[in-house]
Amino acid sequence: MLSFDENKTISKLADRYEKKRGACVEALKMVQRWRGWISDEDLNDVARCLDMSADELDGVATFYNLIFRHPVGWHTILICDSVSCWIMGCSALRDHLEKELHLKLGETTADGRFTLLPTACLGACDHAPVIMIDGDLHGDLSPGKLSEALASYR
């Protein structure tokens, strides 16, 4: 159940738009910032606040790869899955991450610290291969540089 403050914030967001549903992405991002991910219950509550059906809002939530419909770790690692990154060795980075963190793509470490997710493109092809950890872009990576970058999040 959304808190009083969350409901109040969503109402303020919705007031900015001609139709309440215009605030749906911002509302989902706000709830995710507070709770870490969007549960079914949260989705239903947000949909009700915005006069949307849960299915409509779920369609929006699942369209955006940075809105998480499942629990994620404390740190989210997005590994770029674009052609540029594939050519420049992202599969070696993925293998390195899976080995170092003892997880597979799409999983969260046993301690809940890291989640490794693929993403279509991070928009930094000139620095391929790239990953993003908690919104920080790391480019021109090798497995060695990746270990250094990862150490700052442990």
Image (cartoon, rainbow, N blue to C red):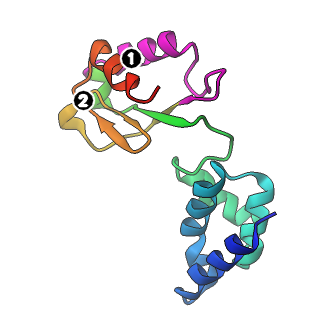
Residue 137 lies in the magenta-colored region: no
Q: Secondary structure at mark 2?
A: loop
Q: Is residue 5 above or below residue 19?
A: above
Q: Residues within 10 Å of mark 2 (few under 14, many from 20)?
A: many
Residue 7's x, y, as percent? Answer: 71, 75
For residue 22, what is the image quadrant? bottom right
Dot 1 amino acid type = Ser
Q: Residues within 10 Å of mark 1 (few under 14, many from 20)?
A: some
Q: Residue at x 40, y 45 (%)?
A: 135
Q: Is residue 139 above or below residue 24?
A: above
Dot 2 amino acid type = Ala
Q: Quadrant of the N terminus?
A: bottom right
Q: Is residue 13 above or below residue 95?
A: below
State the separation of the CA atoms marked 1 and 2: 12 Å
Residue 98 lies in the magenta-colored region: yes
**Front-most of residues 24 and 97:** 97
Q: Residue at x 64, y 29 (%)?
A: 112
Q: Residue at x 40, y 31 (%)?
A: 81
Q: Is residue 49 above or below residue 30?
A: below
Q: Which residue is mark 1?
A: 91
Q: Name which of mark 1 and mark 2 comes first in the sequence.
A: 1
For residue 50, what is the image quadrant? bottom right
Q: Residue at x 48, y 12 (%)?
A: 100
Where are the magenta residues, as a range? 88-115
* Pointer 1 with pointer 2, Cβ within 8 A: no
Residue 79's x, y, as percent? Answer: 42, 30
Q: Secondary structure at mark 1?
A: helix
Q: Which residue is mark 2?
A: 128
For residue 133, what is the image quadrant? top left
Residue 149's x, y, as percent? Answer: 33, 25
Relative to residue 76, is residue 128 drawn left or right?
Answer: left
